[in-house]
Structure formats: C-alpha cells, structure tokens
Image (cartoon, rainbow, N blue to C red):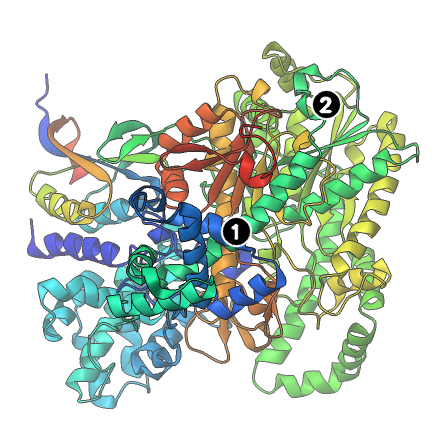
Amino acid sequence: MNPLTRMTKVDIIVAGKDAPAVWELIGAVGATGYTSVAGASGIGHHGQHSGSLLFNELDALTIVITVLPPDRAPALIDAARELLEDRSGVMFVADTFVSRPEYFQ
Amino acid sequence: MSNETSSAGMVRAKVTRAADHVVPTWPIASFIAVNPMRSMEKGQFGEDRHATAPSAGIAYTRNRTAYQRDFASGRITSDDLRAAISERVPELRSHYRDTPFDEAFYLDLLVADVLESNDARPVARPRDTADLDLVNTITSGWLAAFLTTDETVWQMPHRELGFYGSWRTLARHDPRIPRRARRRSTDLPSTCEMAVQVALQRLAIGRADTEAVLREEIDALPGWASHVKWRSENTGDIDLAQYLAVRLSLRVLLLENGNSPHPDHRLEKPQRTAPAGSRDSRDRARRALQRIGETDEHLVIAARVLESHPVTDHSVTWQVAYERHYRMNVLASLDRIRTDSAIQTASDRTDRVDVHVVTCIDPRSEGLRRHLEDFASAPSGLGRVETFGFAGFFAVPMRFTALDARGSVDSLPALLRARHSTTEIAVSNDEAVRRRRGLLTLEALDHSAHAGKTFGVSPFALAEATGLFFGVASFLRTVAPSTFERMRGWIGALIAPPTAADVTVQLAYSLPERILIAEASLRMMGMAITAPLVVLTGHGSRTMNNLYQSALDCGACGGHSGAPNARAAAAIFNDPLVRQSLSTRGLVVSSDTVFVAAEHNTVTDELLLLDEHLLPATHRGMWDRFARAASGASDRLVRERAVELPGASSRHRPSRVRRRSRDWAEVYPELGLAGNAALIIGPRSLTRGVDLSRRAFLHSYESALDPDGSALETILTAPLVVAQWINHQYYFSALNPETLGAGTKTIHNAVGTLGVFSGYGGDLRRGLPWQSVGFGRELLHEPMRLAVIAQAPLELLGAIISRNEVLRNLFDNEWMTLTARDDAMGAWQRYTRYGWQDFSRDIHPDQPKGH
C-alpha cells in the first residue's frame, strides 16, 4: 500500500448565514478548497437546530470541512476561534490522511 | 506557516466580527426587503435602543406625540394601554398583593403615568458628519467606479487585482489626495490584510480597540458597507477587508501628510436619557395620582409601582398598545365569520369548484382574492372560485434566463441560493429568429442613441439630427403616457413580434425534484384540487422611470416578477408523470384539470394569461369566463386602492389610476406593501369574507393534509421569515426615513444598477424611499411589527418554534407576535416565552373564558 500523507482536517459548523465568512477565512489562510454541507441538524449549546428547512438555507446549520497541511492549520484554527468567539458554532480539528497531497498544498 | 498567512486569517476574522451588525443590502435592480436590525434579533426588541450599540440612535418607535394623537382619536384605547402594561410589567400581579390596592388600581396608575410622562426618543445620528470626511468622499467615488460594471462607459482599470489592489495602483492619480500623500501610496502593502494590519499599527490602534475602530470605519458609510457585504457573499469581487484596507490606508496617507482626516477614533456616544431617580418617580406618581383623582396619601407606594415601568420603556408600551388594537380588530373580524363552513376541512369537501386561483401571500393579493371571490359568488353565472395563498415563487427556486435576455435573474427567495437554471425554448424557431433580428435592430438603435449622447461632440450632432423627434416623443410621453406606450408597444411588436416559448423546467429539474415541488406545494397550501382550471398567479409591478420598481415586485422571487416561476410550476403540475406520482401519495389531481400561469400587475390590478399557447381548447371557455370575472374584480380593486393612493380618488375611472403604470413622472405608481401588519396562516375559510384591507400576508394551510408538520415548519421558517423581513423593512424605513430609509425619491441619482445616491454623492442609500412609506410629512405606513395569526395545532407550533433558533429569536424576543388556535372551534391563544395564554377574553371581554 502506498503511504498516505498526514494532513489536518478542520470541521466548522455554523449558521448558514455565517458560512461565507468561514469560506473567506479558509481562502485567506491558503487552503486550497473546502466542502460545505447545508441543512445540518442537532442540539448544542444554543439549543435545538432543525435541519428540515426546505426553503431556508440561511438559518439552517452548515458544516464546512477543509483539509490543509499541518503547518497551515494553526492560522485557520486561530482565525476560526476568533470568529466563533461571539456566535454559535463549533470547530473540530483532527489529524487525517490523504492519498493525493498535492491537492491540498 | 508564514506570519503573513497567519495574520491574514486573523484580520479576516476581526473584520467579520466588526461587521456582524451589517445587514447585506441587495442591489436596487433586485431589491430585497430585509430587517435592517436583523443582527439585533438575538436580543429583545428595542432593548438596546439607548445603548452604545450599532443600533444606537435608531428609532424603534414613533414619538410620544404621535401615540397621544392616536389615543385621542381612539386608535389606541385605555384597554389597549392596560393590556400592554400588563404584558410588559408581569410582576404587577405578584409584587403588590400586600398593598392596600388591587391590580386594577395600579394599572390605572400606570396608564395615567404613560399618558402624563414625557419620554425622550433617541436622537438619530446626523448623516452630514459622514459627508464632511474626505475619506468617505474618496472611498465612495472609488467604490462606485469599481462596482458599477454594467452600464459604465469605461471600467475601472486593474479590476482583476480586486478593489484594494486596483485602488492601490491608481491612487497616485487621484487629485483629491494631496500630492505628497499620493506619492506614498505606491509604498502601501500589496495585500488588503497586510494593509489593514499596517494601517492599524501606524494609527496606533491598540489590540483592544481594533474591533471598535474597524466597526466605526464600517459605520462611516453604512450603505456602501451593507452592499459590499452582499457583494462579497454573492459576487465575490470585493469584500469588507478590501474596503477597510482602502479606508484605513487613506487615513494613514492623509494623517502622515498632515491633513486632518476624520477627527479621531472616539466612538460616538448617543445621547442618553438621564435615569429616572426616586425624585422623578415621586413627581411622576404625583401627576399620575392626580390624573386618576387620588390624593398624595399613598405617594410612596405609587412611586414604587411606577419604578417597575420606567419612562424609557413607555415608547415600546405605546407601540405594544398600538399593535394590540389592530390585532384585536383582525381577530374579532375573523371570529365574526366563524361559521359551520369554517370547520369544514379540506378532506371533507366534496363539491367541485370551477376555478382554483393560487396567488402569492403578498398583501396586495388579498384584495384580488377578495374581489375575485365576491364576483364569483354574485349571480353572474361565473361559477365557484376558490383562492389560495402561497409563496410567490411557487416552490420553484430558479435562475431564469428569458429567451432574448442578456443576463439571468435569480427568481427565488433571498433565503436560498440558485441551484437550478431555466431558460425558454421558442415554440416556433422561425418566429424566434425573426424576433431576435428585430431585437438586435432595436438594441442597435438604442446603443447608437446612447453612444451619441455620451461621447465627445456627438451630442450636438445628435440633438440637431433627432432633437425634434425626441422632443415630440418626450412631450407625448408626458401629456399622453398611455398613447405613447401603446404606440411604442405597437412599433416594438412590429419590429420584433413576440413569440411563444416554454420554460425549460424538465431540463432543469429531475422527475423526483419535480414531484417534491408539487407535493410540497400542495401540502403547504392544504390544497385538494377539485377544479378543472387552476390559475397560478405570480405578480409583478409595471412602472416607468422607477428606480425602485423591483421593491414593488415579488419578494419571494428575489425582487422580480413571479411570472416565470408560475409558468414553471404550471408545467410541473401539468406533467402526467408528476400527477401519477402524486396520486400514489394520496394527492389526486383530476385528469381533466389544467394548470395555467398568469401574472397580476399590481399597478393596474390586471390579470394576464401567460403561455396562452398551452391552454387547451377544452378549457378556453372556462378561462374566458374567469377572465371576465377577473376584469370586474380588477376594476373594483383599483377603485378601492384609489382611496389611499396620493392624488387619486375612488371617483376616478380605473383607467385613470392604471395610467400611473405608464407615467414617467409618477412617484406613487402604487403603494406596494405599505400598511402590511399581519401574516395569517390557515385555510381560506378562516379569512374568507373579511376585508383585511390588503394589509395581511395570507398563507393557506390545512393541518389535516400535513400529518408530520413538515409543511407548517417550512411555512414558519421560510414564508414567515420573508414576510418578517418585508415588515421590518417598512417598519424601520418609516421610523428612520433618513438613516434606514432612502429618503425622498425626487433627488435620487442612480449608481448603475447598485443603488442610489441622494444628490451627487455620499453614501449609498439603504431601505425604502419615503414615497413607499409616507406622503408629505405624514406616514402612509402604520409601523407595526408583524402579527402572525395561525390556525394550526398549538403543540406543533410550539415544537417547531423551540427547534428553530430563528423562530425562537423572533417570537421570544418580541420582534413579532403569534396568536393561534388549534382549529376553527378553538380559543385564540397568545404565544409567550412561558407558554400559551388564553387570549379569547381580550378579544371578546363579555364571553366566558375559554371560548
């Protein structure tokens, strides 16, 4: 088996209306891309969030997932922390492995 | 990780936080009504109105004199004030039980206090301070140059570098910047994030003050900042970090040059009302006791009671009373028509209606529906008409490109992003080619005239050659706008004859998506289709020379006409595969039922059949009969509207009122949604026969057809939110015409298709113009928060609110009210953050509780 390359995966879950700000941060720190999943549901610090909003993407939760080299991750983590200080949202950071590292450089 | 990358992210995060209170403003070509105070919805309505917050200086209510006038006229009664105080001072019942008086006495006392007291309303921030700042003047000019890409003669060079990059390259040529400062502009950092960071350092802004300073810069031109925020989220060619980089760099250049830019970065403090001390309470108590005919014997107790309702709260109390009066009247009207037919659910109905008409929930459709139904019930042989209200995009959110259009429009609610693109396919290729040639000819003529007016000395030659023609045309257009438009239409049709076309809905949406749209629509409306003809009626506003036309179009269609969506929805419902699938889900559509699309022109109230070529011959007679009824209903509606329309009268012929749609000098073509105050969710039997004066959004709903409550959840989280945005846009534009409204139309100058300036420059205006909310010095729009009235299971309503933060914020924080009943026989209950409260006794004080 070919060796995989270690990367850092950052998941940020915010209200749909805050998603553009997260996309902007990801671009600013030099990540090459992200995946955004609208319409997430769950329960957390700010109560329950319904995911079945057929015609409202702004108020449903959005999960933004990005993978970037470990040396670039702290910039995103610090910035996201600053962003999330006064709004609902969570961030999960984990090690991950990718097969095509050039996609994320 | 480089330091630069690290700080770029941090700068972006700080800018985002500093701009949290900025509500995006759509371009004027697709005007979307928004709550300008949307960022405050997490807090109680009006609670920060005196605080040092972004909304400081914004009026949340009218002034006391206006409410006093309403009290004198009976628009607000003592009962309204008592109820408002009971609601806002809930401790009244428990805290004073051990005193010598009962609750009624204290209520009288508090009412007397409200009537006697003077509450100072917040002072709006003066606009002209922004105009004095050179940084504002320069930034505004560069923003206009960078962002107006569509109708300008030349485009700003180096656009590919972004706003900051292109400005940095060109700033050295800007004569408004002093020469020495200009020279230094070439030394500015290359990225906007670095520019912000360097500028903050050179301006000696400490870390603790960074966010406040960024916010102050953003608030210096709130109109531009709001539009830049929209643009960054939708077009992406500019963002607030770039905008701030230009502003802060300019400040540094001017400061270091010895020019005095903006005074300094002290935050403006709003004027505050001095807190009422105990002495004030005693004075208030003395006056209140005197008003209710009592002596000063219990002055201390009275003063203590009054402290529970400080003077600063009085304006909101007046507002609650003002809104309650309207709500009570609407609920009492609904109860007056509570008949046996009202308790009949959709599934019980067996009699077949002749025509179903589905309109947008827009309040203007209420008038159309009411008059259509009246006509149908008259002994004219037209048959039975049943009407429904539904979001005007008919559950078909789409990007639409008309057959001969150069661009597309996003015809969908602002809550969604366009994911499906539709266009038109001509029925006849030959006709389409002929039309295309004609349109190109017309466009070439238009372009030549425009170029002739714009370049060098050509305007002189143009005036010589065509002056007489244009002079006569302008004269005719002014004195006989109808004739002029008829002639123009005739010539246009001669050169480019219209051609029939179909919307490509089957290419844009897969079969499962089309089925989902059809099912969701029927369930949300609670619609059991029994009629052979179903008319899906979008709406649009046809006006001339009106920069704010899109504010009069359909809000659910992104500030565009709902006609394309109605056509797409009709095509979906006429699809045999969709119908087949619907029948397996218990939603049977008869095989002889035909859906047609129509457009309601809200200036003339005329109904136009769209895609006439798709109407089968079997249904032609039925449409003709319906069209006659619609024409009669339209005349009545125009006469009704003329009573309120400035400069019109109900005695005027309908054609005279309709002429406004073609009059290029008319600033009041229609009143749009002025007066909007309620959203009623329920079956038509709840409202049929009640004159709601075109003030209520009406969304159809039948809980019997919504077993899992998903349709109700969709209504509450989408159409309700759009209605609330519209309501608050009117509300705050009426109360703050110079800061959150766009001021008078008469001095507006267009900035491309982005927005308007008042005069020749300054900030981009936000909100609605004065002509949408007022006339002369008086308001046409009664500013009231949306009263949501629903007939739906209370338990379900409560559950939906508790699982949706947007609804919790709106209802718990009193940005709107909710009154509901389980079914037609249920008692009206008022939603509070602590649960439902029986409201029926408030509506009918003489009735026993619970009825």
Q: Are marks 1 and 2 on the same chain?
A: yes
Q: Which mark is residue B80?
A: 1
* Figure check: B365 above or below B173: above
Residue drawn 86% across the image and 40% down it: B629
- Single out the residue that lies furthest toward the right: B380
The quarter of the rendered structure image containing the C terminus of chain B is top right
Q: Amino acid at mark 2?
A: Asp
Q: Amino acid at mark 1?
A: Asp
3D distance between C-alphas at marks 1 and 2: 31 Å
Q: Chain of mark 2?
A: B
Residue drawn 12% across the image and 70% down it: B205
- Is residue B213 toward the left or the right of residue B535 in the image? left
User: Picture quarter containing residue B704?
Assistant: top right
> For mark 2, does the 10 Å Cα neighbourhood hold few (<14), some (14 to 19), or many (20 or more) residues?
few
Where residue B320 appears, as percent x and y from the top left, is 47, 52
Residues tagged 1 and 2 counted as in contact (Cβ below 8 A): no
* Figure check: B716 above or below B230: above
> Residue at label 2?
B340
